[in-house]
Image (cartoon, rainbow, N blue to C red):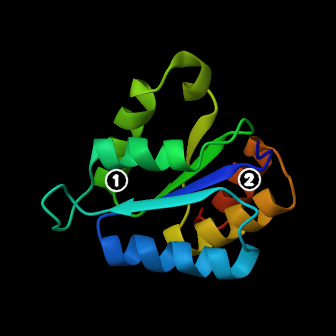
Amino acid sequence: MNTRVGIVIVSHSPDVARGTADMVRQMVGDEVPLAHCGGNPEGGLGTSVEKILVAIDAAWSEAGVAVLVDLGGAETNSEMAIEMLPDDRRERVVICNAPIVEGAVMAATEAWGEADLASVRQTAEELSPA
């Protein structure tokens, strides 16, 4: 069982999600649970609640999961996915209000250092403009 916070990257573009995940993986290796999803069910731009649920499950950690999103629709669908989680998991998943690439890298770096979910979120969100 992994005790590091998991990271999920949700983008409207499958290429952006995959590229961001690749960058994170190169920075922190395989010790941080990481998943990504992007695109609508037809393969175009958009997001999917179902894909987000699969990504959360893939990156699941008892320490929690930090979700990073690119645009408003990704945030809305991520919120819907979190609401669909069982109660015991729902409280351990947060959406970070942070730039997707920089936020994912900083969140994963903090998670790699075995920080708790609140610290991972705070570090990612420090990148957001005031």
The quarter of the image holding the C terminus is bottom right
The residue at 12%/60% (across/down) is: 42
Q: Residues within 10 Å of mark 2 (few under 14, many from 20)?
A: many
| Circle 1: element type | helix
Q: Quadrant of residue 90?
A: top right
Q: In front: 86, or 102? A: 86
Image disc number at residue 87: none
**Residue ranking furthest to the top:** 87
Is residue 70 rendered to the left or right of residue 32?
left
Q: Earlier in the sequence, mark 1 or mark 2?
A: 1
**Disc 2 designates what residue?**
120
**Disc 1 designates what residue?**
74
Q: Position of residue 62 (x, y in %)?
A: 72, 35
Is residue 109 rendered to the left or right of residue 70?
right
Could you tell me how many numbered marks the image carries? 2
Is residue 26 rendered to the left or right of residue 97?
right
Q: What's the residue type where badge 1 is placed?
A: Ala
